[in-house]
């Protein structure tokens, strides 16, 4: 019996180790930091180049699109547009289709990387929640 | 009305408490009267919840906006249909709907099993009542859907979220809830078995159907969610590993595992602890999924808002469930010990076990990855998120391995597979996989996961075909019927096994759809009027963007011409709809051009500035094989339906028929299946259709004339033409045979039976003999035409009704040994 338990124990140990290793290595590639604008700005340098999900609010009137293209420039700030202070502001560039809910003041989560000239959003990386009064706010956009 | 509703909820709560307490008391004292009283109270809860549901639906219909819930989720301009479905549109109502369903299912389960599983029933009542009490408590103290405005009453409601005003979304939540709620029944029976110590397999028999039933609804709900995401959300895919989707998937994994491992317990009395655990975990995950999506613990784009009170209540409830359930399991460990041990890893039960591990691992992995942001924040302070690529990286190999097991498991023998039967079993499926793989490599398919998936699919198909083929052959040998009757009989004798194979077939088709996404092409473009772009072999031209209004909404529609090989093949109309009062959240109306090979999928992304220039921002996808996912689900539902049908449905094909008496039944099945074959094989059969002599001899007497009208050509391609008209060579031969018979002076009946003997069926008759069993033959074409679950059920019931009383006595099996082998092969796992 003990022999059998040793076998089972060893097998499970190997399996668990293998899975943890795999999980660990894939997690390192697959994860993104989820940060508010103000969490990133103080040590801006150290966040540059890291995969980020940046959460903020679209600065009203900052959204610009090159006519008849899908190239966007806009700014996001840390706090909701109507709060007393805006908090930190980051310039954002993006090429692609934006969700319908991407408006002034919208709460957005942007996937991409921070560079010296601002935040670059990856393809389909704009997820916007409209300032909804509805509890059951359904999906605005999906990545 | 609102106060009536609140009162009903309170009354239901009281009745629940009573039912729980009195049932336990009754069971402990052994008092039949107390138990009966508990069951009565239990039914009462169902009645109360039905009335409460009626009250809230009535409030929606009459527009009683003094009730906050009604105000929040409907308005006066909403179509009637959506007013009713607003019932489960929000959090409060969905909880109430949950309790309502649970009370209905619970009552049915108790009613059906109250005699057969008498010892378990009081505890089943108690467990379900306790679960109901929790949800009722939740409603009464925290989320009462009948809460009213205290001061001013608004004149109109806010309206249901337009995204939810979609027919898929109307049936998606109830279906998912049905699956979720249904899982409570197996849990209650499992708990009752643990409490009473009646841990033989009887509780499993009571819950098997329930699990299957819940499972198929869960699958249906998940599939509907996918369809909805694909058609309504407009991001080009159907599964985004969103927490809400994952919440539905978690119990699906464990329920699937349970459906498999239960077979091992029935067959080999093993895995008993494991099965109880799976039932508990499945139930727990349904509650956990609800908690995850309703309390704001996990961030999701379409989760309900965050709610701390709800989170606390749920956490408490979940702790209670876990402690109570696993406490009982530990308490009963001595009774749960397995009676057998594994003989070999190359055995069916080992394959089942591995399948279980993988499924459980999938559940754990998805749970872990879904909770990862929350966990990482709690542990490190940094919120780390994982996206769909991470899920896909893990789930694609896991899925492929499961697919492999789908083909691999059924080929193994119970206990131990010997080398020779491995070779015997694996030859054809492996060959199928290798050939497919070779062809794919030759064709230059370079997406490894998809290629592997296609090869695996071939393997699974090979396995399933081989199982059906061999089973039918063995059965035909023993019963002496034709191959089709044998096939139906085979399925009837082993509904769950062969229904299960059909489910596997459906799963395999779904995987084809998943694999197709490996070849997905997409493009995001901005097209001016008249401008073109090319994707795959399609060329897409923007013909302009127009605005229209139908009173309920404004519609911005793109007019898109689609060309293929320079030829215009279609015009597509992707649109954005702006519903009144929901202008900020336009809905996406995706334009999809479907085909079995691939979908062309166009989304219009509207920007106000585009309107003046009529240029369109488009997301264009070519999604290969997507429709096979939905088609695969239909097959899955069919398989589950077969497994769920009652035994007697198949009675007609189950009996071993003595030759003479069997002829009629054989013939009817044959006619039906021939019709089915004819439907799909007409082009093939056309080859056999040769022009005959064209000479038609005059009938020598009236009998021959009428017989020629009654009989039809059997060549299969001249549409069952009457012998008096059909010019083909097969008809010539039949006419010749008929002439011979008539000249011998035989009567009509004698001639017919002669032809039946000749053809092995009555397919030569233009209309089946209109008596007894043969009337059923009429049903067959309809069955073939509508492969709906319901139709199968109803028709099959009709069959069995005819069969009652006229069942021929089974003949003595011709060979003891074959019979045993057959029994071993066909041992009914039900």
Image: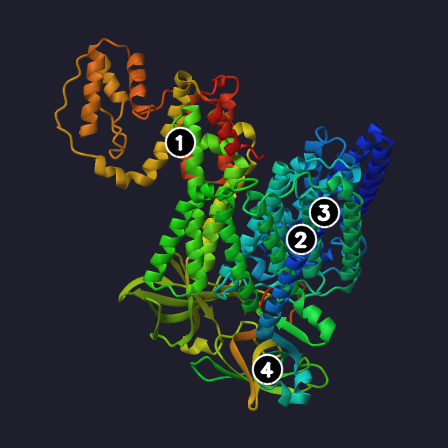
Residue B725 sits in quarter:
top left
In which quadrant will I find the C terminus of chain B? top right
Residue A33 sits in quarter:
bottom right
Give the labeled residue for mark 2: B63
Question: Are discs 1 and 3 less than 8 Å apart at CB?
Answer: no
Q: Residue at x 65, y 35 (%)?
A: B205
SS assignment at label 3: helix
Give the labeled residue for mark 4: A50
Return the x and y of residue B640 as percentages of the image width and height: 54, 41
Q: Is residue B733 left or right of residue B528?
A: left
Report in which chain the residue with disc 2 lies: B
Q: Residue at x 44, y 29 (%)?
A: B475
From where the camera sits, is residue B591 visible? Answer: yes
Report in which chain the residue with disc 4 lies: A
Give the labeled residue for mark 3: B99
Give the labeled residue for mark 1: B484
Instruction: State the CA–CA distance, disc 1 to disc 3.
Output: 45 Å
Instruction: State the CA–CA distance, disc 2 to disc 3.
Output: 23 Å
């Amino acid at each position: 019996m003990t022999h059998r338990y040793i076998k089972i124990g060893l097998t499970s140990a190997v399996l668990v180790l293998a899975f943890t290793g795999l999980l660990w290595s894939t997690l390192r590639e697959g994860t993104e930091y989820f940060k508010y604008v103000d969490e990133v700005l103080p040590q801006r340098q150290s966040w540059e180049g890291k995969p980020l999900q940046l959460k903020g609010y679209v600065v009203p009137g900052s959204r610009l699109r090159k006519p008849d293209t899908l190239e966007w420039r806009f700014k996001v700030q840390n706090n909701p547009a109507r709060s007393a202070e805006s908090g930190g502001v980051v310039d954002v560039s993006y090429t692609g289709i934006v969700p319908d809910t991407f408006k002034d003041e919208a709460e957005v989560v942007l996937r991409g990387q921070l560079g010296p000239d601002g935040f670059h959003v990856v393809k389909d990386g704009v997820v916007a929640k409209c300032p909804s009064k509805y509890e059951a706010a359904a999906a605005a956009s999906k990545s | 009305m609102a106060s009536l509703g609140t009162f009903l909820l309170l009354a239901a709560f009281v009745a629940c408490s009573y039912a729980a307490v009195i049932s336990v008391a009754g069971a402990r004292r052994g008092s039949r009267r107390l138990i009966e009283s508990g069951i009565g109270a239990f039914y009462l809860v169902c009645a109360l919840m039905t009335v409460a549901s009626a009250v809230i639906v009535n409030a929606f219909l009459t527009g009683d906006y003094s009730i906050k819930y009604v105000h929040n989720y409907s308005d006066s301009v909403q179509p009637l249909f959506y007013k009713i479905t607003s019932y489960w549109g929000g959090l409060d109502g969905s909880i109430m709907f949950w309790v309502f369903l649970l009370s209905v299912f619970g009552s049915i389960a108790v009613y059906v099993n109250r005699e057969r599983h008498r010892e378990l029933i009081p505890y089943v009542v108690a467990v379900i009542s306790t679960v109901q009490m929790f949800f009722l408590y939740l409603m009464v103290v925290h989320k009462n859907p009948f809460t009213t405005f205290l001061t001013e009453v608004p004149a109109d409601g806010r309206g249901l979220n337009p995204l939810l005003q979609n027919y898929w979304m109307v049936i998606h939540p109830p279906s998912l809830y049905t699956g979720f709620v249904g899982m409570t029944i197996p849990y209650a029976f499992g708990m009752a078995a643990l409490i009473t110590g009646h841990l033989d397999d009887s509780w499993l028999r009571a819950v098997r159907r329930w699990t299957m039933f819940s499972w198929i609804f869960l699958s249906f709900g998940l599939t509907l969610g996918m369809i909805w995401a694909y058609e309504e959300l407009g991001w080009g895919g159907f599964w985004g590993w969103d927490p809400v989707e994952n919440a539905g998937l978690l119990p699906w994994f464990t329920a699937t595992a349970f459906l498999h491992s239960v077979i091992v317990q029935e067959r080999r009395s093993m895995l008993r602890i494991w099965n109880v655990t799976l039932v508990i975990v499945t139930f727990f995950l349904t509650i956990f999924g609800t908690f995850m999506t309703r309390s704001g613990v996990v961030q999701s784009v379409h989760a309900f808002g965050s709610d701390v009170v709800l989170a606390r209540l749920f956490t408490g409830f979940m702790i209670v469930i876990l402690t109570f359930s696993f406490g009982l399991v530990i308490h009963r460990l001595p009774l749960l010990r397995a009676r057998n041990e594994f003989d070999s890893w190359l055995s069916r039960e080992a394959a089942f076990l591995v399948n279980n591990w993988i499924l459980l691992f999938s559940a754990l992995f998805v749970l872990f990855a879904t909770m990862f942001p929350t966990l990482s924040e709690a542990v490190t302070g940094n919120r780390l998120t994982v996206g769909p690529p991470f899920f896909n990286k893990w789930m694609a190999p896991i899925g492929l391995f499961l697919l492999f097991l789908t083909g691999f498991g059924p080929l193994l023998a119970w206990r131990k597979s010997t080398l020779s039967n491995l070779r015997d079993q694996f030859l054809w499926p492996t060959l199928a996989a290798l050939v497919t793989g070779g062809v794919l490599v030759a064709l230059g398919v370079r997406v490894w996961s998809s290629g592997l998936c296609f090869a695996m699919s071939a393997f699974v198909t090979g396995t399933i075909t081989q199982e059906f083929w061999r089973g039918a052959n063995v059965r035909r040998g023993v019963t002496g019927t034709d191959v089709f009757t044998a096939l139906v009989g085979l399925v009837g004798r082993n509904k769950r096994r062969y229904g299960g194979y059909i489910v596997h077939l459906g799963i395999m088709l779904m995987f084809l759809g998943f694999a197709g996404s490996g070849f997905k092409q997409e493009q995001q473009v901005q097209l001016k009027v008249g401008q073109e772009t090319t994707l795959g072999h399609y060329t897409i031209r923007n013909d302009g963007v127009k605005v229209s209004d139908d009173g309920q909404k404004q519609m911005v529609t793109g007019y898109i011409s689609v060309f293929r090989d320079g030829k215009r093949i279609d015009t597509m109309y992707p649109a954005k709809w702006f519903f009144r009062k929901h202008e900020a959240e336009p809905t996406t109306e995706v334009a999809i051009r479907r085909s079995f090979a691939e979908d062309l999928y166009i989304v219009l992304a509207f920007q106000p500035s585009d309107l003046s220039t009529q240029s369109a921002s488009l997301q264009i996808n070519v999604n290969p094989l997507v429709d096979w996912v939905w088609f695969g689900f239909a097959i899955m539902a069919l398989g589950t339906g077969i497994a769920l049908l009652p035994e007697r449905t198949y009675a007609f094909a189950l009996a071993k028929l003595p030759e003479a008496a069997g002829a009629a039944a054989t013939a009817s099945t044959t006619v039906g299946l021939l019709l089915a074959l004819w439907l799909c094989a007409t082009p093939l059969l056309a080859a056999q259709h040769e022009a005959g002599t064209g000479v038609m001899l005059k009938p020598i007497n009236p009998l021959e004339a009428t017989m020629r009208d009654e009989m039809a050509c059997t060549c299969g391609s001249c549409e069952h033409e009457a012998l008096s008209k059909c010019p083909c060579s097969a008809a010539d031969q039949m006419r010749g045979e008929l002439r011979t018979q008539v000249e011998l002076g035989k009567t009509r009946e004698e001639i017919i039976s002669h032809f039946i003997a000749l053809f092995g069926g009555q397919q030569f008759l233009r209309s089946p003999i209109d008596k007894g069993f043969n009337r059923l033959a009429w049903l067959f074409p309809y069955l073939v035409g509508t492969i709906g679950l319901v139709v199968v059920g109803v028709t099959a019931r009709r069959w069995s009704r005819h069969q009652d009383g006229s069942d021929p006595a089974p003949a003595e099996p011709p060979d003891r040994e074959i019979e045993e082998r057959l029994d071993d092969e066909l041992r009914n796992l039900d």
